Image (cartoon, rainbow, N blue to C red):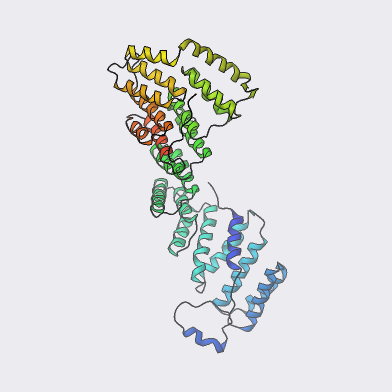
Amino acid sequence: MKTFPRFALAAALLAGASGLALTPALAKDKKKEEQTGPQKPSVSNADALKQIQAAQTAIGAKDYATATTALTAADAAAKTDGDRYFITALRLQMTAGQLAPNDPTADAKLAPLLDQLLANPVTPQEDLGRYTYSRGNMYYNAKQFPQALAAFQKAQQLGYQNENLALQIVRAKTEGGDVAGGLADLEKSILAEKAAGRPVSEDQYRFAISRYYKLGDNAGTQRVTAMWLHDFGTPKNWRDAIYTFGFQGAGAKRIDSRQRVDLFRLMRATNSLVGADYLEYAQLTYDTGLARESVSVMDEGVKNGKIPAAGGKPTGSAAQLLGLARQQLGTEGTAEAQEAKAKRTGTGRALADVGDFYLGNNNWAKAAELYRAALAAPKPGTPAMNADEVNTHLGIALANAGDKTGAKQAFSSIKTAPRTEIAQLWTVWLDAPANGAAAPVAAN
């Protein structure tokens, strides 16, 4: 459970309590009480005012000993709710100012003072929302989730504005046991904010994704992940999303090696590959018979400084893998010879395999041509061509070529999971504002 930082709470209370306006309401000012509308709290007598002003000056100078003495004297002179409001507000400011960062006793020290202010009938309306929200965070930190939820909802009703409020409501609801209801509320809030053209904090997306993932709700995870990547599609976020989807936990168990290659291809397209990824990607493509792509990935990794190299050539295990991949390529013949043979055979499998060769060589146009021919072939071949896989690869080729419309059409033709989900991730990248049109990678 993520708690609200106590230092941030204290800082917020300090900021709100620093501008107290002290106005004595002596006998000559009684007519003010007859004015309509909300009145600012005031001090009822000169003795109380003297001590309150002395405390305020001392707190400003961080002379907390003098402030404590003055507030004790003010307590003795206090006669009205207004007097008690200023005394409590200053005591809150003094207490917050004395706290060390992340003091574990902060909530216990501040909560009683907040409760007094919230119960005081003259506490200004504009402060009630802030105080209620702060109290809600203290309830949340104490794992008193029903009370936290009630406080957050009350702060919202009071018109309090805070970028964390919507998420805190959801957290309190989910931690209190209503996980489905909390997540439904959060998605509704996210969609409403987006529809209104207002930004959604990344924390809201991350919270929803983590909770859906823990629930094993793959559809919910994918749905919110798509919105998150659309708004915050950094290379790191793309890698996190792809890795979570297909490289760890339940996702890793249901994704086969050929599907994982397509996830590596998406990492490559989103510039989210990191050092070790290049060698793992190259090994996987070699193991699945895609030596051309294995060589291409290693060349790119060396060029980008992600694969250990000397003199522009990989070293260690990368050098061994590169040698094996090139040896395999030597037995396959040229792309042209493979294409001619596949066309003579006329099966979908043979044509798709050559499409994969062109895809691994970043020759997007030829790859798309062969994939389309494979899908139109009258015979599937042996083993039978997988139409969902071919449509995935056709979409990847077209996406890298900059044909967003064609790519999305190919991805939408996929029928079965998890390839439908892989296609959805590719489509999110195509639709992301930062992407615009896909940036083609030059053919080798």
Spot the residue most to the top.
Answer: 331
Name above or below for residue 38 compared with residue 215: below
Name above or below for residue 17 compared with residue 190: below
Spot the residue most to the bottom.
Answer: 28
The image shows residue 135 at horizontal and vertical percentages of 53, 60
The residue nearer to you, when weighing 135 against 157, is 157
The residue at the point 57 percent across, 64 percent down is 112
Name above or below for residue 287 compared with residue 268: above
Spot the residue most to the left.
Answer: 378
The residue nearer to you, when weighing 440 against 84, is 440
Q: Is residue 30 left or right of residue 431?
A: right
The image shows residue 308 at horizontal and vertical percentages of 63, 25
The residue nearer to you, when weighing 255 against 320, is 320
The image shows residue 207 at horizontal and vertical percentages of 48, 45
Name above or below for residue 142 compared with residue 217: below
- Which image quadrant is residue 259 in? top left
The image shows residue 116 at horizontal and vertical percentages of 55, 68
- Which image quadrant is residue 428 in? top left
- Label count reads 0
Q: Is residue 386 left or right of residue 34?
A: left
The residue at the point 52 percent across, 87 percent down is 30
The residue nearer to you, when weighing 275 against 224, is 275
